[in-house]
Amino acid sequence: MTTAYLTDFEAASQNGGSKAPWLTGLRRSAIERFAAQGFPGAREEDWRFNNLNPITSRSFPLAPVAPAALTTQDVARFLYSLPGGCALVFLNGRFSPELSTPAPKIEGVTVSNLAAALGTHGKLLGDHLGQYAKMEKSGFTALNTAFGHDGVFVHVKAGAAMSGPVHAVFVSDGSTAGSAAYPRNFILLEAGATGAVIESYVALQGGSYLVNTVTEAVVGEGARLEHSKIQRESEQAYHVGTTHIHQERDSHSTSFSISLGAAICRNNLDVVLNGPGIEGQLLGLYMGRGRQEVDNHTSILHASPNCSTREVYKGILDGTAHAIFNGKVYVTPEAQKTDAKQTNRNLLLSDRAKVDTKPQLEIFADDVKCTHGATVGNLDPLAAFYLKSRGIGPLLGRKILTYAFAAEILEELPYPAVRSGLESLVNARLEEGTEA
Amino acid sequence: MEIPGVTNAYFLRAALNEIRKARGEEELDPIDFMDLAEERLKLVDWGPEILGRMVNARFSGGEKKRNEILQMAVLEPRLAILDETDSGLDIDALRVVAAGVNQLRRPDKATILVTHYQRLLNYIVPDVVHVLAGGRIVKSGARNWPSSWRPRDTIG
């Protein structure tokens, strides 16, 4: 089914394609790459637990432009009150200035949509775009590089700081069924800069569409990044995303990944520690019910000494949901004194839910501390008994304990509005039970 | 039992409302509950910040015991069984726990204290004392009685 994408690409490049030769060249080589390698298959180690058939057995043409009739009322429920922050809203992959709020003007900070930044920051993007999330990694990344035209762009100059997070909201409206959107985000924090980005993927209504998204973040020397991704697609939709965080020495990054929606969701998170003294945190929560499939593939490359990473991913599975976790930690011979902790815990609420969890540690340095642990289990019967002995019945007890399991991740979210919004969403999911 | 992820406030309100429902009473909303909780916190000499902490998570031994008494004060069980609630407590924590128990004594509520030590009974004067040995009650008596009694005299 790759030919439909090639035809689509030709049509798109005729019809208002890029002016900059570097971008035209990048997109052209990406579509050629896709033409040559196609979609990944179950024969590939990184995809062997996935059932990609629903995505690859048909083609998803570019999503149509959303009707202009949407108002801020329509998207208000997806926004958060973020002091000092702003929201950029994208409808079916296209920036909607009417639904967005302007970024506060701060010396050294640029927050805009990527399509605009291609004009204002062409040189910078020419140097960086596609250099981190490589198109060679998978056919999905290649397709995003070929088609990705808009998303959030953040540039914070050395020593500058954003006053609050930028919330990029990718909305699929009802007209996107059967089509694809390719959000493309780019974040550059120069030395000593501070920045925060929240990506939300939401749907106005159900529908079986595809979102294929790529985010590249460069965290300069001593810089600090807070990155959050909240995936709340329609439960009939497909979501494939790559987040690549490239860190320089003494920098700090935290990545939150919350996945609640989509029939099939695949999140790739690649963190590269390219200098000594780096700290990284990778926190994730995923929930599956009905027949949802949710896959988190994380990879941390410890390429320098004295870096520490902490990774905690937790999953709650109900119905016949299927979760996949693959946590790769690669420690090069140079990366002495690495401290890497990885935990993946899964809670199965039904007998038919399933988890494939695979820690993958490849360590080539001898003076390191690397730990990993994976658990798959049910609610703690002792905790349930404790609640019962205080008058809390089994139904409410199960809800409280399930929520508590998720709360360990949610309570680390740095924004009160996002935290309480997600707490309500998770509680609502537990109220609704297994029905999708 | 530690339950990370559930705050003391949420846990206590959920438990209290389940009990109230079962008794046919109206449930308390968060504001009414906070009023009640803050009043009961005084019994264990605690400030409201304890309500925001996760149930028993990273509590010291003494804090856990105090938390038990707080639960008792909020949930008002008709019968409470305090099994070795004095073990591992320093003298200050013991005083707080004992004061809590004493203030919750009411004619329509009963408390069974299980202890190996006289110490606790210096602060809580029981109405009735039963001595258990080998799984049976071997002696019973009235208040103030244990102080003159030597356990080793009777057993074996």
Image: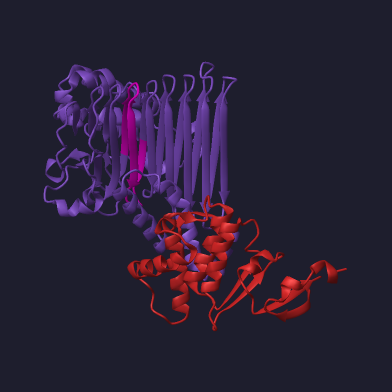
Q: In the image, residue A145 lies at what x, y percent?
A: 29, 27
Q: Does any portion of residue A321 appear in the rendered image?
A: no
Task: Please say whether residue B43 is one of the residues in the magenta stretch.
Answer: no
Question: With respect to residue A46, does B61 lie above or below?
Answer: below
| Colouring style | by chain
In the foreground, A223 or A384: A223
- Count all numbered tags in the image, as a single digit: 0
Question: With respect to residue A429, does A364 lie above or below?
Answer: above
Tell me the quarter of the picture where residue A94 sits. Answer: top left
Q: In the image, residue A192 lies at what x, y percent?
A: 30, 24
Q: Residue at x 73, y 73 (%)?
A: B146
Q: Residue at x 37, y 29 (%)?
A: A244
Q: Does any portion of residue A423 appear in the rendered image?
A: yes
Residue range of the region highlighted in magenta in the rendering: A212-241
Tell me the quarter of the picture where residue A183 sits. Answer: top left
Task: Please say whether residue A240 is one of the residues in the magenta stretch.
Answer: yes
Question: With respect to residue A318, does A239 lie above or below?
Answer: above
Shade representing chain A? purple
Please identify the residue farthest to the front as the structure is shown.
B148
Shade representing chain B? red
In the foreground, A9 or B150: B150
In the foreground, A124 or A412: A412
Question: With respect to residue A151, does A288 lie above or below?
Answer: below
Q: Residue at x 53, y 52 (%)?
A: B59
Q: Is residue A200 left or right of residue B73?
A: left
Q: In the image, residue A137 lies at what x, y percent?
A: 40, 26
Q: Residue at x 39, y 70 (%)?
A: B36
Please identify the residue farthest to the right as the structure is shown.
B156
